[in-house]
Every structure is written in C-alpha cells, then in structure tokens.
Amino acid sequence: MFRLQGSKVLAVDMTGDAVKAKNGSMVAYDGQMAFKKMSGGGEGLRGMVTRRLTGEQMTVMEVRGQGTCWFADRASEINLVDLQGDKLYVESSNLLATDAGLRTGTSFTGLRGASQGNGLFTTTVEGHGRAAITSDGPAVVLRVSPQFPLTVDPGAYVAHQGNVRQSLQSGVTFRTLMGEGGGEAFQIRFEGDGLVYVQPSERNTIAGDV
Amino acid sequence: MPFREINSRIVEATVLPGRRLFSQRGAMLAYQGEVSFTPNVQGGQGGVMSMIGRRMANEDTPLMSVEGSGTVLFGHGGHHVQVIDLTGETLYVEADRLLAFEGTLQQGTMFMGSQGGVMGMVRGQISGQGLFTTTLKGHGSVAVMAHGGVFEVPITPQRPVHVDPQAYVAHHGDVRNKLSTALGWRDMVGRGSGEAFQLELSGSGTVFVQASEEKL
C-alpha cells in the first residue's frame, strides 16, 4: 500500500509482500525488512544487457517484509501514479518505487530523448498497481485528449501514461542560429489520449540553451 | 511556546527579559524590538570546562545568545526547520543541526561510545555524527534544521524502528540505538542494495527523519 506522508516521503505498508525501489532510497522502517539489490532492474539477463547498452541503467532493490517502510530521494516531491494495465513512460532517475507486480522495461524515444537531456531511451512501467515518481518541485498532471494536444518543454517533462503519440517540434529560426533564440527552440508535442506529468523546473538540456 | 513556525523554513522566536535563547551564529534573519545578540565564545552553556569539552568533541558550533524583548526570525541555508518541544526528556541531535533553543534547556555532549562501546563509536563514524553528539535536556523548545521535510516515527518497545544513518536527524525519549548491519556477500562484491548500515532504535520515544539522504 503506497501512501504519501507529506509531499516528500513515501510510506509503504507491507504485509509480507514486496516493492521495487530505487537503490538506497529507504530512510526508515519499522518491523522486519530485507533489502536485496536486483541487478539490471530485475528484468532478467536480457533486460540487464539492454539497460547497459541503452545507458538507461537503474539500480533497483527489492524490499520485502512486514511493517512500514519510508522512502525519500533528496527531498524531491513524490507523485503517485495508478496503473490499470496501461503503460507509464518515465526516466529511470525519476522512478522511485513500484509495486512488485509491475513490469519495467526500456523503450526507444528517438530524437525527443536527446532533446530532453536524458538519452535516447526511457523506462517503461506497465501492469496493474501503483508507482511513485519523483519530480523537482510539485508536478502538475496535464490531460491530453484528441481535441487538445499538449506541448511541453523537454526539460520540464517528467513522465507520461496512456495512449499518447509524441513528436519533437522545433521552432528553430534564423534568430536561434544567431544566438537570439527565446530558449524554447524545442518542444515535445503529445497527441492522443493520456496524462503528462510536468515539473515546475527545467533540467539542463540542449534545447534549453538555444 | 517561544518558537512559532512562520513557514517551513523560518521560525519566529519571542524573546522576553530574563528568558535567554541560544541560536546558531548568523542565523538571525530579522528582528523587532530591543534585542541584543552576543557571540558566545563558549559555544553554549556551562563554564570553561564545558567549552573545552565541546572543542575536544568537535561539537562546538558557533552559538550566540539572544537577549532582550522582541521577536526574532531565524532561518539558515534554506533548510527546513522543525520545532521540537521537550518536557523533561533528553534530545540527541548533532550540534550543526541546531538552529535555536531555549536557555532553559541544559546542553551537554555525549560520547557515542557510552552507548554501546566500540560499536557506538563505529556508529558515530558511519552516521556522520562523529564520536560525540549534543544533548539537550529539560523543559523548552528546540528548532532543528533538516534537508527536506522532517517526519516523526514513534518508537515503542514492540516496534523498533530502523533509520538510514544519513536521513537520521534527532531522537528523544528512552531510546537505545545500535548500528545494525545487513552486510552480505552481495555488498562485498559491489552488488549491495545501498542499505547496508541502519540505525536500530528501540525503547520508547520518537525519532525524527528527514526526507533526504543529504547531510547539512
């Protein structure tokens, strides 16, 4: 059972079941807990090799036991995401914890990933259960529907879920090349039906510099 | 209560004549009224012997005493501030986490080795507390700093609490703490879960934990 204690601490009540969490993110627990590192994100040998190759390494531990375990990561804000069979796309560094029943994997993001400043690949989480993602500052959840596509700054994008198509949109003009750009030369455009998580802070990206 | 939380990072302290406060030097943000700030060479209460004790224990965070009548705002480094009220029990906290405390509290230093011998000293090294920690005892309030928000976890004899040493802030009550290791062969070959060392607190009391693994 995932619940938030304040906005920066995730409390998980466990009765003999397990959760997957980012390595070293436990801050306190009561009861009995066992921590075990899962090499390659617990996706087997193939997943491990894929993660190595894609640079989307994720050090995950499996926490199993009885009692309450508290997780936090450098005082960043935590958001809970409910998954009902749909797929969540999130950067591995923003993924704090997932139910053990959720499957994680990697997916290719194309040029968009490079503009976000976090590589060409991203992490996917799918199945039924809950996941906790971190963001720098409280994240807003924006809905994308077929009538209302959404455009997001790559540096402020955290995660998205649902049946969403994304494309990189560039507003590079003559001015940008002259170094007179507005700092918003690249955007990610989401179309379809789903949710996008946006943080009130921007990572350093190539897109942010031009 | 002399301390009032203005927001999560600033506390307002009410100073009355004859009720002295101690605060970390340079932590004053603003004040109203007739308040004087005196650097405290001794780094707190007690005489010269206490000062020497603190110097040796490396728990001698520069303090100043605040006297007069008025209100003072305290804050430091954008850290979150938590006010802890003590009613006779002893609070164990690192000196550099102390933002301000009432003069009615008795300040002391505790040798980590006095709780658990050699393991206590090892524990101090691992949790970054060093060999000594500061104790505050009596009736009054303390403002403690932490990175990220602070949450309290109650400790009862039936339910000992384990805390990540880096996220530990302070504790009070009748609590025994010991370092528990979950070192396995996995940690030896670099496959550890990052949770090899934990502080195990048992007894009855409260432990304060911050939402971050960063030290101040």
Image (spheres, rainbow, N blue to C red):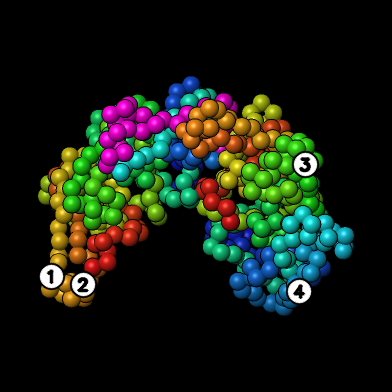
Nearer mark to the viewer, of 3 and 4: 3
Check disc 4 and give the amino acid type.
Answer: Thr
Residue A191 vs B81, above or below: the answer is above
Measure the C-alpha gap from mark 3 to mark 1: 67 Å
Measure the C-alpha gap from mark 1 to mark 2: 8 Å
Check disc 2 and give the amino acid type.
Answer: Gly
Give coordinates of residue A89: x percent, y percent. 26, 41
Q: Residues within 10 Å of mark 2 (few under 14, many from 20)?
A: some
Residue A178 lies in the magenta-colored region: no
Q: Quadrant of residue B182?
A: top right
Measure the C-alpha gap from mark 3 to mark 4: 34 Å
For the residues labelled 3 and 1, say whether their Cβ atoms are less than 8 Å apart. no
- The kind of secondary structure element at disc 4 is strand
Nearer mark to the viewer, of 1 and 4: 1
In the displayed structure image, the side of residue A143 where residue B134 appears, left or right: right
Pointer 2 residue: A181
In the displayed structure image, the side of residue B42 where residue B208 appears, left or right: left
Q: Which mark is residue B29?
A: none
Residue visible at 56% across and 64% down?
A: B77
In the displayed structure image, the side of residue A108 where residue A49 appears, left or right: right
Q: Which residues are magenta?
A: A28-54
Pointer 1 residue: A173
Nearer mark to the viewer, of 4 and 2: 2
Q: Chain of mark 4?
A: B
Residue visible at 54% across and 51% down?
A: B214
For the residues labelled 2 and 3, say whether their Cβ atoms are less than 8 Å apart. no
Give coordinates of residue B200: x percent, y percent. 65, 34
Pointer 4 residue: B38
Nearest the viewer among A57 and B137 is A57
Check disc 1 and give the amino acid type.
Answer: Thr
Badge 1 and badge 4 both on one subunit: no
Nearer mark to the viewer, of 2 and 3: 3
